[in-house]
Image (cartoon, grey):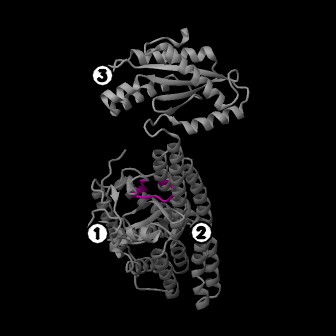
Amino acid sequence: MFRPHARLAQQFLWFLTAFTAVLWLTQPQVHWLRLDHPLALSVGIVIVVISETWPLEVGRGSTISLASTGYLSVFLLAGTVETFWAILIGQLISWIRHFRGISSVSSAAVMLLGLYAGQSLAKLVSPNLVVRALVFALAFLILNHLLVNFYYWIRDGYQSRQEMFHALVWDMLAWLMGLPLVAIFVLLDRAYPHQVVIGLLGLLPYATVSLLLSVYYETRSAHQLNALTAEAADAITAAMDKAELVKNIQEAFLHVSGYTIFVLYLLDPVSGLLERQAYTYPTDQVPYPEVFVRGGESLTDWAIATRTAEFIRDARQHPSANPKPDDAYPLVSGFILPLMTDRKIWGFIVLGHNVPNRYSRHDFQTAKVLAGHAAMAYRKLLQEEAVQNSRRDPLLAEVYNFRYFRELLGERIAREPNHPMTLVFLDLDNFKMVNDRYGHMVGDRALARFAQMLHSELRPGDVMARYGGDEFVALLDSTNSAGAAAVLARIQRQFGEYEWPDVDVALGVSAGWAVYPEDGQTPDQLLNIADVRMYKNKLIRKGKFQDVASE
């Protein structure tokens, strides 16, 4: 791969400009001030100015100039000199709106080189109008794209084949649509020479091509964008946890909107603060804090306070749009998107580019749609998390509370009335002595250790819960009495053999179980039977280890 060289690319533009100037200035027998068709020249200048000042957008940040129809019209109608001046004067006038230094000058040079190649080859073919038009168009188009792509290859080190093909296709469409219209216009002018109305018809090929390509592109891009947006929205709403949601939001906006700057804040339900979850920034100095504190005077504060998405076309006209006006890589164009449902703020997104006018109004509407999906997805995750937390024991995160366990047991009995399962009841022996002698912190560690041991013995489909204090219950799916005894024997052995640091108390586990449907048909019946058997087991054990299977 060629190594990118920005300075060499600039030198290439200067060489191209100088070469073009020398090439045209040394042309023999060219009467530069002899204009045989001033009306054609005027029409050409108007077309070049309009096309270069307001080019047709054919992609995010990509445009094409349709001035080629103007060049072709003037060349076939009036010749090389008028076409030369139409290009030069039209480019000069367009620079009033936006002049980019050597880039603008070299752009005009490329057009003039294309004109030179086109008119030189057109002289070598038959005087047939259509043939001359085709030869001129092909020479102009091929040389233009070769020079432009060569420049990008030097500057970037590579040139995407897809980008080259994309630009070439659009220019070819413009030429193919413009050729017959230009030919008709030239024939009319020859049939009715020196008619102002006929001369003004030179605008018709350009206007027609612009209209048709604009309609086609808008329809095509809208269809593609809608499909891409729907796919991105599905990915956002399908996220199963917060980390996946953050990742999917980043990727969705990258594919649909595109950005060089991206910052995502989400509301922390506990602290109530907006915390930064992800960011993409070109430098190490990110001007967006980890925690967003409201109450400032920035455009972001305004967007959140008013619950209104902000569309920034050029942040240089809005000093409050950036957190640091003197930042080396500020957001120049982009969006500030509050993530909200029913005016409740769940977070916000800042995304954009360092160039002005990067996004359209349609891009803004699409981004707001994705922001709405992101807000609903995050709210759903928080609601599911709240439901899960309501089911969990406040001390032991991996253990359900008894209320949820009882509901689940009733649901399983109702759903599968003949499916075998075993409810086990467990109680820690001498646990009160640990709390009294060593304190509740040590007791809590003992509970957590026991919960881990019990959880390690469970299979998918089994459920455990804290009944209260030092008592636990578990539901073993597809398990009979012998299977339950084997599981509990392993738990009793592990817990009894575990050496507790700095704890001189013999801890053990007493257990009992009830098998559904043999021992009981309802949750209460199963719980009562398992509780009675557990208490009987405790009396037999008397605080010393004994294998449940032997009782």
Query: Mark 3 = which residue?
Result: 501
Q: Residue at x 45, y 40 (%)?
A: 394
Above-or-below relation of 373 to 455: below
Query: Mark 1 = which residue?
Result: 325
Q: Residue at x 32, y 32 (%)?
A: 439
| Distance of label 1 from label 3 (alpha carbons) | 59 Å
| Mark number displayed over residue 213 | 2
Q: Looking at the image, which residue sits at the far top?
A: 550
Q: Residue at x 37, y 80 (%)?
A: 96
Is the residue marked by circle 1 packed among few (<14), some (14-19), or many (20+) residues within 10 Å?
some
**Mark 3: which amino acid?**
Pro
| Distance of label 1 from label 2 (alpha carbons) | 39 Å
Q: Is residue 257 magenta?
A: yes
**Mark 2: which amino acid?**
Leu
Q: Quadrant of residue 24?
A: bottom left
For mark 2, give the secondary structure.
helix
The residue mark sitting in front, 1 or 3, is: 3
Q: Quadrant of residue 98?
A: bottom left
Which is nearer the eye, 546 or 367?
A: 546
Q: Earlier in the sequence, mark 2 or mark 3?
A: 2
- In the shown orientation, is residue 28 left or right of residue 164? left
Asked if disc 1 and disc 2 are in contact, CB closer than 8 Å, the reply is no
* Location of residue 370 in the rendering, given as x and y in whole percent from the top left corner: 53, 59
* Magenta-drawn segment: 254-268
Above-or-below relation of 302 to 167: below
